[in-house]
Amino acid sequence: MRAAVMGANDGILSVAGIVIGVAGATTNSYAIFISGIAGMLAGTVSMAMGEYVSVNTQKDAQKRAVIRQKRALEHNYQKEFEFVKHNYLKQGIDEQLAEKATKEMMSKDALVTTVRERYGFEVSEFTSPYAAAMSSMVAFPLGSVLPLVAISLFPNAIRIIATFVAVIIALSFTGYGAAVLGNANRKQGVLRNVVSGILTMVVTYVIGSLIGS
């Protein structure tokens, strides 16, 4: 889901920047459309490969963390026990209850418990790099269709401003979705996404206008 939302967001933002920039340089609809298609294709491959490499790197780091934790439990079990107990105490749990909870969790599966408490992930829940790459590969072109269609279908007189509006609305949705998935502040997520989109389109339009003039 994270890869899909971010892929769609990047598709919207990247292709919007390209077509707005080219539209600032020329009124030729064919040139604008071709540049958008080229950006869509290049971005789709780039995002999928980038997501694959990124998730693989994360997965390798998680595997190394599990190996380190196995060694830690073998050589200093009590230290790991105290670490888990201290985490429970920091959450406001009574000391006796924290002691009891730690004993129960550690006796059930010490590796799973300590990896979760130290590194924040579940041993059995590694993200698939293939699934992330495929999600991004599908989401990026879907996101990039919006600015491409907007810049192509609207009349010349309003197509730039119409594309601006369409992209801002779309970025509001993807910004909100990303904030929900990341358990972050919704308003800040939407605002940050919209502002970055506006800046991207303004900068590329100004550069395109200067080149075109």
Image (spheres, rainbow, N blue to C red):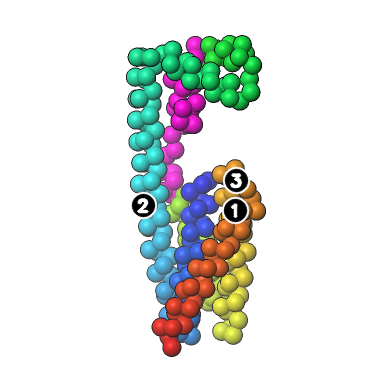
90 and 141: which is toward the camera: 90
- State how far apart marks 3 and 2 are (Cα): 27 Å
State the quadrant of the C terminus.
bottom left
Q: Nearer the N terminus, badge 1 or badge 2?
A: 2
Mark 3 highlights which residue? Answer: 184
Mark 1 highlights which residue? Answer: 189
Seen at 58% across and 62% down, the residue is 194
Mark 1 nearby-residue class (10 Å; few <14, some 14–19, many ≥20): many
Range shown magenta:
106-134
Secondary structure state at the residue bearing disc 1: helix
116 part of magenta stretch: yes
Mark 2 nearby-residue class (10 Å; few <14, some 14–19, many ≥20): some
**Amino acid type, label 1:** Gly
Whole-percent x and y of residue 129?
Answer: 40, 42
- In terms of image quadrants, where is residue 64? top left
Seen at 43% across and 49% down, the residue is 134
Whole-percent x and y of residue 100?
Answer: 58, 11
Whole-percent x and y of residue 10?
Answer: 48, 59
Marks 3 and 1 close (CB-CB < 8 Å)? yes
